[in-house]
Every structure is written in structure tokens, then in C-alpha cells.
Amino acid sequence: MREENLREGKEVKGIDYSFSLKGRVIRVRTSWRQHSKLYLPIQKHTNRVIVLRSFPYPPVIGDAVLTDLRDVEIGVRTADCVPVVLIGDTWNGVIHVGWRGLASGILERAVQLFSAHEDLRRTFAFVGPSAKGCCYEVGEEFKEIFDDLIERDGRIYMDLQNSVVNRLKDLGVGSIGVYEKCTVCSPELPSYRRERTEDRILTSVRVL
């Protein structure tokens, strides 16, 4: 199991971060627009996974997209939830993981479906910025759902990003890269919890 910290060494206004791997470009950006080759699901904090086998394809409700198509960029939008990108030898995937999705098994369902096409030991997962344990305070009821919460000064916090990383490891994903940044305490990033913003980070993958 290999894990890397992919955080940039400098602070900039927003994010426009990208890298290539296995003939794909993974990109995280705060400034973006919809285009004819970009597929975005209708995110509703579900555990529904969309397997995209043809394109164009109408947007439907789901919080993960898997595809082996070469002529489409797939992405998810976040403003505190965790964006995850899966890279196999042929297939790509994107997953939107909030606490509701994490509790209902969106990550496990998406990785399980991905493993039908790819060897997880050869799969790379990129985990983008999200609300982290420094800022993401939750209620007592979360103790009934999650066992990896942080208690500090009489308050309860959740590190969504760390929870996702640990589950990916448990699921057998071979390599994980983490852009370790908290959206809540990074004013250059959109955070719904901090300011109820309508802005979103787009995390996407496409074939070169």
C-alpha cells in the first residue's frame, strides 16, 4: 500500500491543480465551466453509481460515475465533501463522498463495481480537499454511525478525508494520493459549512 501527500507547496487563490497518470489527467479546480465533453451526475448524497457506457448521456441522479470511454471527462462537485478519483488500466471513476454517502456505502459500492473491471491492487485513488478534523464539528448522533470521530475539548469532530483514505485502504486499493487541505479553514476554497456558498470545486478525470 502506497500513500502520497499531493498538497501544493504554495498558497494560491483557489485551486487549479492537475497531474497525469496512466494516460489520464486528474484535475482539481475552483474556476470551471460546463462543456460538451464533461459529464456531471446530479448529486444527492446517494449510494447510486452511474456506469457510463455511452456518451452523450443525460445527467441522472448519482454520486459516482465509472466509465471506460475515452472521449469524455467525468467529474464531481464538492464544497466540503470528499472528491475521489479512481484510475485503473482502462476504467476511470469519480466519487462524491459526504457523511451521508459514507454512511450509506457509496465508496464501497463504487469500488466494488470498479473491481469488476480493474485489479484494485493496480488501481490509483486520488483523494481531494474536504472538511477535516480541524474544523468539521459534528453532533453526538454521529457516534452511532462512525467509529473514527475525534473528541477534543468536549466537542466532536470528523475528518472526512481521513475516513475515506482509511476505507480505501481497507478495500484494497493499491495506491492513494491525498491533496491534504481543509476546505473549511482555507478561505480560498469554497466551503458550504463556512459560508453556505454556491461555488464548488470540480474534480475530474479524462483520457489524454
Image (cartoon, rainbow, N blue to C red):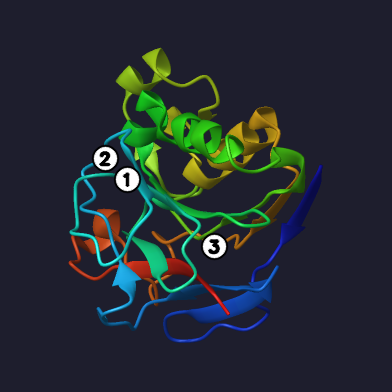
- In the current view of this chain or complex, which residue is farthest to the right? 1
Sequence order check: which comes first, mark 1 or mark 2? Answer: 2
State how many labels appear.
3
Sequence order check: which comes first, mark 3 or mark 2? Answer: 2
| Circle nearer the viewer, 3 or 2 | 2
Taking the image as drawn, is residue 56 in sight?
yes
Amino acid type of the residue that numbered disc 2 sits on in the rendered structure: His
- Residue 7: percent from the left, percent from the top? 64, 69
Sequence order check: which comes first, mark 3 or mark 1? Answer: 1
Q: Which residue is mark 2?
A: 45
Q: Quadrant of the C terminus?
A: bottom right
Q: Which residue is mark 3?
A: 181
- Residue 187: percent from the left, percent from the top? 38, 73
Taking the image as drawn, is residue 133 in sight?
no
Foreground pick, 104 / 185: 104
Amino acid type of the residue that numbered disc 3 sits on in the rendered structure: Lys
Q: Quadrant of residue 166?
A: top right
Residue at 43% across / 62% down in the picture?
185
User: Is 90 located above or below residue 136 in the figure?
Assistant: below
Residue at 47% across / 38% down in the picture?
110
Q: What is the C-alpha distance between the residues marked 3 and 1? A: 22 Å
Q: Does dot 3 land on a helix, a strand or a loop? A: loop
Q: What is the C-alpha distance between the residues marked 1 and 2? A: 6 Å
Q: In the shown orientation, is residue 74 left or right of residue 48?
A: right
Q: Quadrant of the N terminus?
A: top right
Q: Which residue is mark 1?
A: 63
